[in-house]
Image (cartoon, helix red, strand yellow):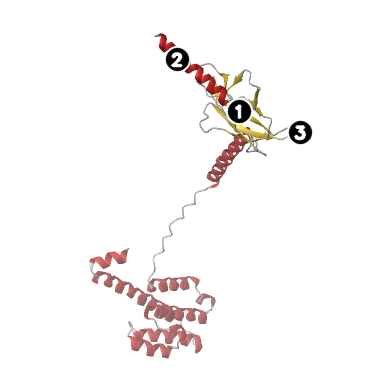
Amino acid sequence: MLKMRRILTLIMLLLGLGGLLLADVNIVQSLENDNDLSVGDRFYFHLRAEYPLNRVVVPDTLTNFKVIKVERITEAGLPAHFKLTIVPLLPGYHSFPSLQVQPVDSGNPIAYTDRFRLNIVPVRAESDTTLVDIKAPLKYPWQSPGWLYILAVGLLLVLVLLFFWLGRKKSVPEPIKPVEVPEPKLPNWKKSLQKLLDLQARDLLSKDMVIQHHYELSWILREFIMHEYRIAALEMTTFEIRVAINRVGILKSDEVIRFLAFCDMAKFAKHKPSLEETKAMEDWLKSYLLAFEVIEAQKLLNRPPGETDAANR
């Protein structure tokens, strides 16, 4: 047991001597602002020698401290020396390792700094788990205050809501257009019959407008022939109409020509027919037009049931 104690004492002495041998007596080191340090506080490590220093080697294994700046200072009349800016990262007692210091002149030896130990005071209680920034956030140039961004977002939301509200208010539904129901197409005979009744209602004969009355009477029949048989009767003479209707073969062609000739005599030959004659011709025209109503009804009866329903629709 006594031998073991002697061996341990010898080992401790050897380690102490090794530390003294590693420390360079030419290096003068000093600390600045190293009292009551907390995590994030800065302190300074000064390194001087009797000869100019060229470089300080900071090990990559440094974990409890952060060397944020290494300054090589040259002053007139003094050899170049170093100033290291260091920040502790963790609370508690921590040792700062030895650093290698290289001289400018290779004739001077490479030296090593002494280790030193610092007590880093915690910035909060151990039970406090709230994260606290070590340092206030940096502001870049022309940075706007935070409230300005909140105001801009609020204005944007107001504009968007206003846009949708006004757009919905202005949108008026289009009025429903009434469906235009086409008027039923009247057959040609019914149109001509209505014109005949209108002419009789005007009573031109009582106003001594014989020529005008017979001119319009002839016009009604000519217009009917044009629409019913596709003959340009309005542009033809009575003789030309005779030729055309004989070729086509219309209903009661002889009586049609007789009617037109009667009207021509009243229009061009200065023949003034009696009221009874004119009345008889009007009755003939009316019966002639009504005959086509019978023909139309017979055509509907002769059609198949499907075609009849389609025609009625």
Label 2 CA crowd tier, 10 Å (few <14, some 14–19, many 20+): few
Quadrant of image for the C terminus? bottom left
The quadrant where residue 293 appears? bottom left
Check the image and name the residue furthest to the right: 76
Task: Check disc 2 and report the residue beneath it.
Answer: 8
| Residue indicated by mark 3 | 77
Q: How far apart are marks 1 and 3 (CA)?
A: 27 Å
Sequence-wise, which precedes: disc 1 or disc 3? Answer: 3
Of 106 and 262, the residue lying toward us: 106
Which residue does the image show at 28% across and 64% down from the upper left? Answer: 309
Asked whether the residues under the numbered discs 2 and 1 touch, taking CB atoms below 8 Å apart as contact, a structural biologist would say no
Q: Which amino acid does label 2 sit on?
A: Leu
Q: Which mark is residue 86?
A: 1
Front of the two marks 3 and 2:
2
Q: Nearer the viewer, residue 103 or 61?
A: 103
Residue 123, position in %: x, y?
A: 57, 19
Tell me: 61 left or right of 24: left
Amino acid type of the residue tagged 1 in the rendering: Ile
Disc 3 element? loop
- Give percent across and percent down for residue 163: 56, 44
